[in-house]
Amino acid sequence: MASLRALVLALLMGATALAQQTTFGVGRTPTAEEIRAWDISIGPTGEELPQGKGTVREGAQLYRSKGCAGCHGASAVDGRAPILKSKAPPNADVWARGRILPLRAPHATTVWDYINRAMPLNREGTLHPDEVYSLTAYLLFINDVIKEDEVLDATTLPRVKMPIGEDYARLPEWKPKSPRLKGYPQQQQQ
Amino acid sequence: MGAKRPDRRGFLKNSAALAGGLTFGAAAPALGQEQHGPQMIHEGKDQIAYGDRSRHVTSVRIAHGGRPSPDNWGLTFHIAAPLQDSVGVITPSSLHYIGTTRGSFLPDIDPKEHRLMIHGLVDRPLTFTMDDLKRFPSVTRLHFIECAGNRSSRRAKNVQETHGMTSCAEWTGVLLSTLLKECGLKGSATWFVAEGSEEVKGASSMPVAKAMDDVLVAYGMNGEAVRPQQGFPLRLMVPGFEGIFHTKWLRRIKLVDRYYMNYNDFGHLDRDPKVAALDYQIGPKSVITFPSAGQQLPGKGFYEISGLAWSGGGAIKLVEVSTDGGKRWNKAEIKGTAQRMAHARFGLMWNWDGKETEILSRCTDEIGQVQPSREQIAKYWNKPYDQTFSVPGLDNSIQPWKIAGDGSVTNGFA
């Protein structure tokens, strides 16, 4: 028994030593270019946005030439794909104006990110940065979020004030072993 | 091989005779038939390379929600698992439910070319090949996944339609925390974005606290490589979180200092913080899979009521079954040891008296969360409980099954 206990102890200590080891030295350091090429997640600060710029006018043309109108409709409300312009009056509560990406998104960067990674259908990832800036500008314009003459680029896009403002839920701070929502709808006393 | 056959035949003949002797007693004609033995399955090449199930077993997945999958856009691809036929807790890989971030087109990924890049707020950004990932200490765990759309409705005709958008498999891989330690996680990293390599590069934001707790970068599923429909060669397992977080075809993890509001995140946008919380971690949920709607009890007598229970909060601690419409609750037996964020199989022996009744199950998880009824949920939201009531967030409500006097079983919500 004693020797077995010693063996267990030795194994545990070995495991502890392994856990404390900082790294295994496995994996390769990617180059700055490799990171840039894959880093397409555009956060609210826009720090990942590429060079380039776009206008509402160019966006209106691209909306037709890139086939957006084919699925979303020429007026962005009359296609088979989700509508991209609200049918509700402009001053209504943004939550009452439909689940429309270029209107409801809390950040304009989300609109850019979405178009860049997911559109056009079956030709995803083929749009150039200028084209994504322009399409974003056009969709924000038709929802009265920006003016017709605004130019969007890596600096101006993250500054666009979205109509939702702060009126959306933040996720609760997640901790292990925490209930999804305290007291919902009943909880046993621990 | 040839020499072995007569032996096997002889064994079958003997065991048939033995079975006949024990079961049928003096039923001589039956014994005579048994002596010929069952017909053999023809052994072809397929039987050697990758085994098939019996042709008499016909349990299959179905398109979820009564809509075609893929739809005419090729976008919707939601496929439900046949829980009514399930035994134990593991869903066979071929029957595992499917929900795609978008699109039914599976990327055909050469694992030799596949890479996982971890970067952002780390000391050492790193790129891993599949071989690299297998050099790290591995873990093997049972975990369920459940789609946010897994909710029962009045129209649903069986448990596959009410609850089929969940499955449970044995997953093998490396803990994300191990990889993050390898990269040197910076203190400023509070969220991470996980991204797939499919056409839309589906991306979701998740808390680093979850990454350090139990998130798994999985390459194995039920003893073999993860299936393409489940993200071959690499998928993220985020135990207990809504299905969409379990990023398939995983190629990139970026450590960031805020919620990124990317592609999938927009779909999670809610106004009410309570609803947002209920759209995140999955609540305690259970369902009786036998007897369930669409099945038929041949008559009164003993049956084992059997079902599945799971929770995003941890392991299932207690399952109770009512056979009288919820008046009395009986503690069911949990088969084996319930695992964290995994389906648990429960059973309760029941002597049906042949009278009309309603059967239900409810579960409690290790942190004390109790599965609610729809009536309790409506009360929580101060809403009347009627046919128009829709459960906010992920629906984990109790499913009633009605049993008629003739033994037919139907959906209690109908």
Image (tube, rainbow, N blue to C red):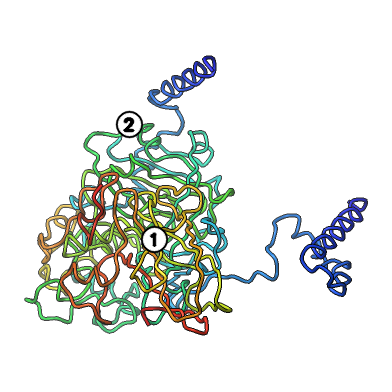
Of circles 2 and 1, the one toward us is 1
The amino acid beneath tag 1 is Glu
Left/right of residue A147 with respect to residue B19 in the rendered view: left
Q: Which residue is mark 2?
A: B184
The label shown at residue B404 is: none
Q: Which residue is mark 1?
A: B320
* Of residues A28 and A155, the one drawn nearer to the viewer in this rendering: A28
- Disc 2 to disc 1, C-alpha distance: 45 Å
Left/right of residue B367 with respect to residue A29 in the rendered view: left
Is residue A2 depicted above or below A30 in this figure?
above
Q: Could one spot residue B163 in this view of the protein?
A: yes
The amino acid beneath tag 2 is Gly
Q: Quadrant of the N terminus of chain A?
A: top right
Q: Could one spot residue A120 in this view of the protein?
A: no
Is residue A69 depicted above or below B192 in this figure?
below
The residue lying at 40 percent from left, 47 percent from top is: B340
Rendered location of residue B294, percent (x, y): 51, 79
Chain holding disc 1: B
Q: Are marks 2 and 1 in contact (CB under 8 Å)?
A: no
Rendered location of residue B261, percent (x, y): 24, 56
Say which label, 2 or 1, has the lower sequence index: 2
Q: Judging from the image, what secondary structure is the residue with disc 1 in?
A: strand
Is residue B69 depicted above or below A125 in this figure?
below
* Of residues B95 and A124, the one drawn nearer to the viewer in this rendering: B95
